Amino acid sequence: MKILSNIKNYCSAALIVGACAAVTLNSCTENIDESDLYTFTGEMMVDHFENNPDQFSSYLTILGKVHPSKRSSSTMRELLDARGHYTCFAPTNKAIALYLDSLLHMEEPQVSSTNVDEIPDSIAQAIVFNSIIENGDLEAFATTDFEEGALGLTNMNDRYVSISYGTRVANVSEQGDTALATVIYVNTNSAIVEADIEVENGYIHAVDKVLSPSNASISDLIMTTPNTQFFGELLHLTGWDKKMTMYKDQAWEDKYDDIRGEGCGKGSFSAVYPKNRYVGFTIFVETDSIYESKDLKEIEKLKTWVRENNYYDDDTSGGHPTLWDDNYENEDNWLNQFVAYHCLPERLTYNTMVVFANEYGCDASMMKSRTASQFYVNVWEYWETLGKQRRLMKITGCREKGIIQRRINRKSVYNQSTYREAASLMYDPGIYVNSTNKEYDNQALNGFYFTIDDILIWKKEVPTNILNERMRFDITSLFPEFMTNNIRQTRTQNWICNLDYLDNLVSMTDETLFQYLPNRNYESGMGAWMDYQADEFNIQGQYDFTMKLPPVPYTGTYELRYGVWANNNRGMAQIYMGKNPANLPAIGIPIDLRSASGTNPASTGWVAESTIAPAGSDSTAIYENMKTMRNLGFMKGAKYIQVVGGTGRDSQDNLRKIIYTGQFEAGQTYYIRFKSVLTSSSTEFFYDYLEFVPKSVYAGEFNEDIW
């Protein structure tokens, strides 16, 4: 059984967030101030701190008091004097003095003196660990790498560092005009006063306040934020606030030292166990002004609106009708369902709600530069929300007027030639997600909340129209732990997990080596990886494992498909599926993933489209070949997936296997099992993505698109 630490047991005054003053500007003209930008100096970080004692002497002293880990005898000062790639948000002497003074004058003082030589080790460690990101093999973050929202790597305190932008007065002209300079804020409150100090081992960004992220639970943060009070009340009434206090699995922490070396060198890849197993949440929150604008900022008015529109009464209820009484903590209650559909059981940053990687039009240079400005097509992800009903939320990364956005439950129509959205045929633009809550912190100890521009509701159009489509699930997205612990798409190493780490992995034999491989360097223009979202699970040994399947949005007939990338390193697996994980029936015959046998063109019906229709104009012949393949239980890979030399449709080894066709019930939990049928323990099981496809798509009025 997993032992979870909650927020109240973790709190430390060293993580208290300082207040941020708001500045009102009039008669303004914008002027970007570049005077605070540094260039390369040839120093190590410690050299720069030593050479600038008037600015960093306090920080340098504190670095000498802190050790990188309990097992390390060296100090952080020594670490930052060595080679590596570090991003350091170094607080100035003034920033540290202000911070320690605030701790001294608390109702229960956390320090006895503002002398940096006398502060407790816990305070010193919080200051240092919150200020440093270890970038591993990746380059440190310069301000040109920043996007609004959280940076892609956590700091040494395993917290995200969030970036936002504002302005400050640069100067006032003789005529009284106010010129503004752009200011970069870190974690809402800390302004960068000197940016991009390039040193041999990374970048230093001097800040005017100590980075001190909130240690409140996600619910407490929402309940105490001035513009989210009403939703905070709903969290409390429904009891979801008490269900979202978990923070860390202490049992995993205790066993990590015993198992951390076991994964290295096993199988064909070098992989490591995750050091931590944090628990996290993401909540989408309407601000008070949204409820006020719709005259719904009262429980009874909200109840009337929900009931009159018949929201939540659908087949995801599993035969349990929505209750309209005042027992709000009952998960069948209308208000409980309303709140639950706002909440996800993983910690997502704004930048990890969707993944830009390997989609059509993407290339490696975009990924390496960490920019989303040139991405060609929409990307999306399907997330399961909290609550017994197992409802899905679709988040789309789209571009409008040149700006990349995140929208919830967006429904688009695409031009099938360019795969661009047809704006004139937009079914539902979706609910806009803000990357920040402006002057208010949106990062809690155990997650993030994001404000939205409309009321998020499970209305009948969501399952029957918005989610009535081919749903492609990257396998990594089905494990909340990979999101919360910043494992997904973290390109510094490969990972290995056991049964204790992943809740949705319900059984696994000891012989199963469960490895996660991100495309670490986006090698070969990403083309060596025929993967959806440029990552995969590579499972080895005499594997036998069972996991939960994602839910379906409504009861009906679906195809369940498995994404194939065949090669001679693969093996053969028998697939099982059903509702009882202890007794799953076999589905079909074993699938052979070896390119020399099971996926050759003769057995799958694959024919290159350049052969079928050299000019690309004979769509009838192309669809006839698709029918031939379907009769053999296969489909070509998705054109949406970018690979070397073309797309997923251009390789006979990049396929989709139709596992099962039949009825799935909304609100129910189904399981899938994969078992090796070969005696060799060195073969690989490739596990990349699954597709749930309703009959209206694969056998509807029109042919299913090739994307």
Image (spheres, helix red, strand yellow):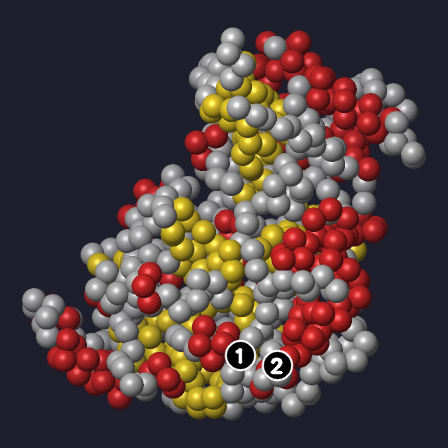
The front one of 172 and 311 is 172
Please indicate whether residue 103 sits to the left or right of residue 301 in the image: right
The front one of 494 and 338 is 338
User: What amino acid type should be assigned to the residue bearing mark 1?
Assistant: Lys
User: Residue at image x 32%, y 86%?
Assistant: 699
Question: In terms of image quadrants, where is residue 633?
Answer: bottom left
Q: Could you say where residue 555 lies in the image, as x and y percent from the top left?
A: 51, 87
The front one of 214 and 157 is 214
Q: Could you say where residue 335 lies in the image, as x and y percent from the top left?
A: 72, 72
Screen quadrant of the N terminus = bottom right
User: Residue at image x 33%, y 56%?
Assistant: 377
Residue at disc 1, secondary structure: loop
Q: Could you say where residue 523 lies in the image, as x and y percent from the top left?
A: 33, 47
- Residue 300, placed above or below residue 209: below
Q: Earlier in the sequence, mark 2 or mark 1?
A: 2
Question: In terms of image quadrants, where is residue 417?
Answer: bottom left
**Residue with the mark numbered 1:** 460
Residue at disc 2, secondary structure: loop
Q: Could you say where residue 705 lies in the image, as x and y percent from the top left?
A: 28, 74
**Residue with the mark numbered 2:** 310
Please indicate whether residue 334 sits to the left or right of residue 651 in the image: right
Name the disc covering residue 80, or none: none
User: Residue at image x 70%, y 39%?
Assistant: 213
Neighbour tally class for label 1: few under 14, some 14-19, many 20 plus, Cα within 10 Å? some
User: What amino acid type should be assigned to the residue bearing mark 2?
Assistant: Asn
